[in-house]
Image: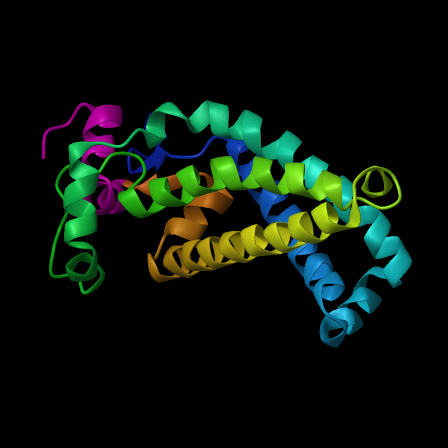
Amino acid sequence: MANDTGNLILRHPAGERVTHWAVAIVFIFLFLSGLAMFHPFFFWIARIFGDGQFMRFLHPFAGVVLVLLFYPYAAKVWNDNHWLPADDAWVKNMFSYMRLEHHPTDTAKYNAGQKLMFWSMVPIIVLLLITGFFIWQPWFAPIFPAGLRRFMGLLHAFLAFIMFIGIGIHWYAAYWTRGSIQAMVRGKVTRKWARFHHPAWYREVTGERL
């Protein structure tokens, strides 16, 4: 698993990195276009995408693309996101860990924060797809009564807001944890980084004992 220099470890294969960034780009478009359609105050955002009509046309198709990108990716990393006893300890000591006062000794490839993000996205994305069908103009929305469309529209917006909060925390944590963004760009991390942040994963991929 180590590269030729003996200091770097492959953390994210190229396919995972490409999919991850594709999901991020699609999400940014969905969030901005969804915000523009949510309230007239934000409609100026539509100018970024040409005009409101074109943006409204693209938004639901982008939602389908998000589903097609995310779930095959989720299937590949599913086992790595199983909840472990070490994750309970990570949550318990989360703030001490952020202050560098606590060092996790059994964190696997993904820590508890990353797993919580993953398991929140698994149901939310499919629920966004389902609620989106009820308000997809002009294809599906006319099939349903107005009251149901309004309810599904509110639920769709609420789910999108929850997802925005989760991804916002995820991005902030990635920025705060030096080396995380570089790992998702280049795919590799140093042994020192792996030993400190994900010691159980480090032991697994290197066979070394800490």
**Residue 133: x, y in percent?**
73, 39
Question: Is residue 17 rendered to the left or right of residue 57?
Answer: left
Asked if residue 43 lies left or right of residue 11, the reply is: right
Q: Give the residue at x 71% y 46%.
A: 148
Q: How many marks?
A: 0
Which residue occupies 47% across, 44% down? 184
**207 displayed left or right of 41:** left
Most common SS among magenta residues: helix
Q: Is residue 110 visible?
A: yes
Does the magenta run of residues contain 79?
A: no
Across and down, in percent, residue 40 comes to 77, 73
Which corner quadrant of the image does residue 67 belong to? Answer: top right
Q: Residue at x 18, y 42 (%)?
A: 88
Q: Is residue 15 visible?
A: no
Q: Of 149 and 93, which appears nearest the observer? A: 149
Q: Which residues are magenta?
A: 191-210
Query: Residue 99: image x %, image y %?
Result: 18, 65
Image location of residue 48, percent across then percent down: 80, 65
Q: Answer left or right for 192 relative to 185.
A: left
